[in-house]
Image: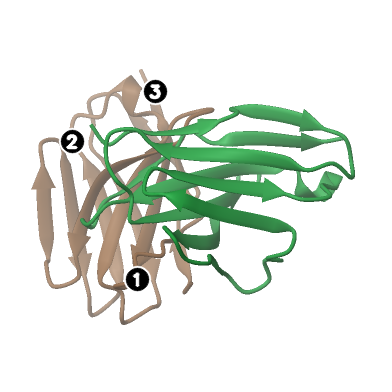
Chain colours: A brown, B green
């Protein structure tokens, strides 16, 4: 797959908003995803966005997509301790093969 | 809904032996299943795509004779690591997709080859 890059670490205070950023290189990406992985567990799909959308909101999660800059972000409002995990950005074309970023480890401090 | 299971959750085997990992979609029919490999503190790398009733397609650099994939039904895919070596030790994760965009991941199988 094509390259997907994201920052490796994010530390945030409980109650604040978290913003995780991701960039990708494949201009033919159709879908962009955010997954959450807790220690020792598999991946949980948080949300996804079609490439023809700019924004998607789902409760505390807001995804912003800048297709021109190939930049994707995930904002978590009112971050809680249970949000501590690794967050993966991923993209796919119509074949649904996922290319993942390296993951951002989010640590929520009291 | 949309639960994917893997069995076993962890396995230790001796070098030179083969290990089979099962991936099952429990409450939906998976038209496609994917197999990924994850090294510690790294991202997931796609190994192969498996469609029911047809041969798996492997990503570049993945040895198809070493990683045998069988997708016998719409709810079961298996990955067999043949003649395992210590460098095959890794976390193997499967995912399953129905007819929608969403892909559901199994909890993973930790393979350790001694």
- How far from the left and from the top, in percent, is residue A61? 18, 41
Of callouts 3 and 1, which one flags the residue occurring earlier in the amino acid sequence?
A: 1
**The residue tagged with tag 3: helix, strand or loop?**
strand
Question: For the point 82% across and 47% down, which residue is it?
Answer: B84
Query: Image quadrant for the C terminus of chain A?
Result: top left
Mark carried by residue A77? 2
Badge 3 sits on which subunit? A
Marks 3 and 2, Cα distance to the nearest angstrom? Answer: 15 Å
Marks 2 and 1, Cα distance to the nearest angstrom? Answer: 32 Å
| Residue B67 relative to residue A41: left or right | right
- How far from the left and from the top, in percent, is residue A70? 30, 74
| Residue A76 relative to residue B58: left or right | left
* In-front residue for pair A110/B74: B74
Q: What residue does disc 1 label?
A: A95
- How far from the left and from the top, in percent, is residue A53? 11, 67
Residue A75 vertical position relative to residue A73 in the rendered view, above or below:
above
How many residues crowd around disc 3 within 10 Å: few (fewer than 14), some, or many (20 or more)?
Answer: few
């Amino acid at each position: 797959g094509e390259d997907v890059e994201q920052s490796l670490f994010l530390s945030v205070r409980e109650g604040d908003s978290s913003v995780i950023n991701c960039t990708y290189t494949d201009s033919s990406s159709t879908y962009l995803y955010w997954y959450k992985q807790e220690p020792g567990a598999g991946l949980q799909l948080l949300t996804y966005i079609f490439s023809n959308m700019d924004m998607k909101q789902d409760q505390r999660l807001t995804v912003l997509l800048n297709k021109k800059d190939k930049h994707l972000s995930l904002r978590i409002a009112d971050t809680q301790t249970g949000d501590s995990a690794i967050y993966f950005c991923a993209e796919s074309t119509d074949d649904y093969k996922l290319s993942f970023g390296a993951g951002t480890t989010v640590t929520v401090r009291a | 809904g949309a639960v994917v299971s893997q069995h076993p959750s962890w396995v230790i085997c001796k070098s030179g032996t083969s290990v089979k990992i099962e991936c099952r979609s429990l409450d939906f029919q998976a038209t496609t299943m994917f197999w990924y490999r994850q090294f510690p503190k790294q991202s997931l790398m796609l190994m192969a795509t498996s469609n029911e009733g047809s041969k798996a397609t492997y990503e570049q650099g993945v040895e198809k004779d070493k990683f045998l994939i069988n997708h016998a039904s719409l709810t079961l895919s298996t990955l067999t690591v043949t003649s395992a070596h210590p460098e095959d030790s890794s976390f193997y994760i499967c995912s399953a997709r129905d007819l929608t965009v969403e892909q559901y991941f199994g909890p993973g199988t930790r393979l350790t080859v001694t």
